[in-house]
Image (cartoon, helix red, strand yellow):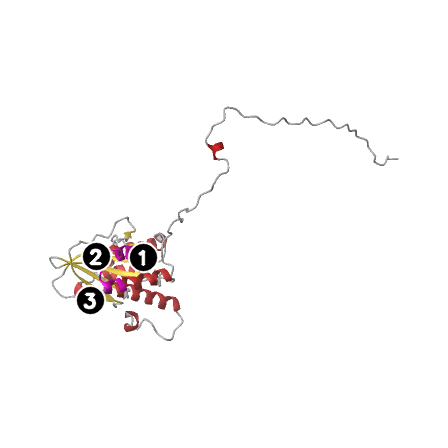
């Protein structure tokens, strides 16, 4: 059973197959990431994210706990409600917490665009707007936690950042809220390499099984980066290799035959006018 089914995201009816597919992918991957030590998969994946303004996602290594809430319905005051796919809370020592909201796409695009309302309505702008006004108690992670950072991460299958889409979201957010915003991005395609690296030194059989399942799913969906050209295992054998070792001191070209002149003449054979 996946988290997507528990949360009612996978229904037996309905026509929006692409959204159901990405909900299932999100559920399978982020659901599995909860069962693997965070430093082996989740944190390395989050750290692949780069913001529109070129920042990297920084999270302290001293992890005390990882909180995870799937498809929370956010209704912050003065904001249009939204439902990010996952909100992760990385709790570090001293009761500090980093909040990372995740909007994951597979085949579909951003589901809502800017409209005439005074509040941001573009999907990413709306989620960024709500996240800025949330707290750990919003997700029932406990009280007494101090928010160190709160960021929105956009996950797609692109090989490079979809800058146009993110720029539109940030433009609406900045114009309507009169404050600068930033959105992080990463690709599903960055995760397989992280999982492969984790498998090389993973001895726990249960952790290995979860990592292998995630890796198999991503490979089956073709969510990998270009792996390069296969190394050449064979070589050509030249019949006269010595020819390529010695540099000639002079070159001799065959004589070119002289073209013989062909006699010709011109004669008008048209009709003589009267």
- Of marks 3 and 2, which one's residue comes earlier in the chain? 2
Q: Residue 54 carries which label?
A: none
Q: Decide if residue 193 is in sight here.
A: yes
- Of marks 1 and 3, which one's residue comes earlier in the chain? 3
Residue extending farthest top: 249
User: Measured from the top left, where is residue 20 in percent x and y?
Assistant: 35, 68
- Give the residue displayed 44% in from the left and 43% down from the top: 235
Quarter of the image holding residue 106?
Answer: bottom left
Q: Which mark is residue 192?
A: 1
Q: Name the residue under label 2.
A: 39
Q: Residue 139 carries which label?
A: 3
- For marks 3 and 2, give the CA distance: 23 Å
- Give the residue displayed 49% in from the left and 32% down from the top: 243
Q: Which of 261 and 175 is in front in this view?
A: 261
Q: Which of 238 and 262 is in front in this view?
A: 238
Q: Dot 3: few (<14), some (14–19), or many (≥20) neighbours within 10 Å?
A: some
- Give the residue displayed 34% in from the left and 62% down from the top: 216
Magenta segment main secondary structure? helix
Which of label 3 and label 2 is nearer to you? 2
Quadrant assignment for the C terminus: top right
């Amino acid at each position: 059973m996946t988290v997507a089914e528990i949360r009612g995201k996978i229904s037996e009816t309905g026509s929006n197959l692409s959204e159901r597919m990405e909900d299932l992918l999100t559920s399978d991957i982020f659901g599995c990431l909860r069962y693997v030590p965070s430093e082996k998969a989740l944190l390395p994946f989050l750290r692949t994210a780069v913001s529109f303004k070129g920042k990297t996602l920084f999270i302290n290594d001293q992890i005390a706990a990882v909180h995870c809430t799937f498809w929370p319905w956010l209704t912050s005051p003065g904001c249009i409600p939204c439902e990010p796919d996952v909100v992760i809370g990385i709790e570090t020592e001293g009761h500090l917490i980093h909040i990372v909201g995740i909007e994951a796409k597979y085949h579909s695009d951003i589901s809502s665009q800017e409209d005439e309302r005074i509040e941001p309505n573009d999907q990413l702008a709306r989620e960024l707007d709500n996240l800025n006004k949330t707290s750990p108690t919003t997700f029932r992670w406990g009280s007494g936690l101090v928010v160190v950072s709160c960021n929105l991460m956009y996950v797609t299958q692109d090989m490079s950042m979809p800058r146009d889409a993110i720029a539109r979201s940030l433009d609406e957010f900045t114009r309507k809220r009169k404050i600068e915003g930033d959105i992080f991005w990463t690709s599903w395609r960055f995760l397989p390499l992280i999982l492969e690296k984790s498998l090389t030194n993973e001895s726990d059989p249960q952790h290995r099984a979860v990592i292998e399942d995630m890796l198999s799913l991503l490979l089956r969906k073709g969510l990998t980066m270009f792996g390069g050209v296969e190394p050449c295992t064979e070589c050509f054998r030249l019949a006269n290799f010595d020819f390529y070792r010695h540099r000639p001191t002079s070159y001799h070209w065959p004589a070119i035959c002289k073209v013989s002149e062909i006699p010709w003449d011109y004669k008008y054979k048209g009709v003589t006018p009267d």
